[in-house]
Image: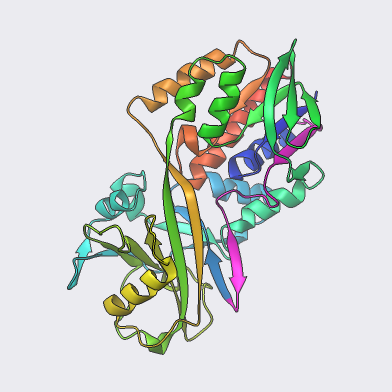
Amino acid sequence: MRIIVVGGGVAGLAAAWELERAGRSEVTILESERRPGGVIVTEQVDGFVVEGGPDGFLAGEPELPALAQELGIGDRVIEQLERGTSLWSGGKFQPIDAGLAATLLGIDAKASEVAAGFRSFAGGMCEPVLAVAQRLAGSLRLAQGVAGIAREGKRWRLAITGGSAHDADGIVLALPAYTAGRLLESVGVRGGRELAEIVYAPSVTVSLAYRREQIGRPLAGAGFVVESPSPDQIRACTYASHKFSGRAPDGHALLRAYLGPTDDHPAKLARDQLAAILDIHGEPLWSRTFYWNRGLPRYRSHHAERVAGIRQRLERLPPLAIAGAGYDGAGVSACVRSGREAGRLIAQRTAR
C-alpha cells in the first residue's frame, strides 16, 4: 500500500510519523517548498535563536512532549522563564490578564491554559521538525508541489507541478484549507469550496538584537501588547531572550515585534517604536523580518460542524484525510494532533 502525505509542515510530518509507526513502509511526503516545517522557521544568528513562526506551545498540551520522547529529544523541551504580559496604553505599562492578552494576540486558548505558561525547545521550535524529517529522510521529497488529484477506481493519482505524477492507495492532505479545499472540490467533495474560503490572516514579525545596556527600561515579564494599535503600529512585543533560555548570548537581548500588513518598512517601524517604548539607545545589532501573507486561519461560526461534515463525505472515497491548522486548531500542538489522527485514520483504512 502506497500512501502519500501532501504537505511537509508539522501536521504532514506528524501524519507521516504516525503512518511509519503503524508499519506503513511505503510513505512519501511531498512538500512544495525547499525545506520542511511550514510556518515553523528557526534561524541561528550570531548566537541568537530567532523564531520566524511560533516560538512555543502551551505547557499543558501533551502532544509535542510526547512526540519529542518518541524521537529521542524529550530532554530538549524547556520551560518558560518569565511570565506575565503588560498592556502598553501609549504612556505606561499596566498588568493584563493572561486570557485577555491571548485574545489580543489571536491565541485560541482558555485563560487557565495561558496562565500555565508555555514551553519550547532548547534549539528552537525547529527541533521536532528536523528530528522527524531526519527519521523520514528517505520518504521526504522537497520542491514537489501537487497540482491536482484524481480518483482512479479505488486509488488516487496525483499530478505533480512540472509534469510528473504519483499513484497512491491513500492520501493525507496536510495543506492550508485554501489549497486543500480546491483539490477536494475538483474531485466532487461537497463543501470543498467552503474550506477554500477560510481566511488566513496576514502578519509580520520583526526580531531585533541589542546589547542589554542599550535598553533603558527594565524588561518585565514576557512582553507586552499594544492597546488599540493603529495600522502602522506594532501590535505586541515578546522579550524573546527573557521568555526562554538560550535565545541570546550573555549581555544581549532579543526582542520580537508583531505587526499587521503595512506599506512601510516593518523593521524601521519596529525599531523606532520599540526605541520610544523601551527607551532603547542606538541601532539594533541586526534585525530579521518574516512575512506571512497567509498566517493563522480565522474560523467562522460552525466551523467544526462544517469540517466534520466534509470528513464524513470523505469516507465514501478511497482513503483520504485532511489535517492541519485550517481544521482542528491553529496551534502547533493542535497541528501535531490533527496530523497524527489523520495518519491513524489512513493506516486503518489501508489495512482493510
Q: Residue at x 52, y 72 (%)?
A: 247
Placement of 322 over or under 54, stated as above or below: above
Q: Quadrant of the N terminus?
A: top right
Is residue 347 shown to the viewer in this render? no
Residue depicted at 51% across the width and 60% down the height? 290
Residue 274 is inside the magenta segment: no
Give the position of the C terminus as an image quadrant: top right
Outermost residue on the front side: it is 263
Q: Residue at position x 35%, y 48% from top?
A: 106
Residue 130 sits in quarter: bottom right
Question: Foreground: 127 or 144?
Answer: 144
On whether residue 37 falls in the magenta region, the answer is yes
**Type of secondary structure dominating the magenta stretch:** loop
Residue 151 in the figure: left or right of residue 309 = right
Residue 186 at what x, y percent from top left? 60, 19
Which residues make up the magenta segment? 23-47
Q: Dividing the picture into quarters, in which one does residue 337 lie?
A: top right
Q: Position of residue 79 (x, y in %)?
A: 47, 62
Task: Say left or right for 139 vs 44.
Answer: right
Front-most of 113 and 104? Answer: 104
Q: Position of residue 350 (x, y in %)?
A: 73, 19
Image quadrant where residue 351 sits: top right
Reply above or below: 165 against 265: above
Residue 298 vertical placement versus 192 (above, below): below
Q: Is residue 290 visible?
A: yes
Q: Is residue 8 left or right of residue 220?
A: right
- The image position of residue 2, as x and y in percent, is 79, 26
Number of callouts in the render?
0
The structure's colour scheme is: rainbow
Q: Which residue lies at the image location 73% right of the left edge and 26% below the top edge?
A: 158
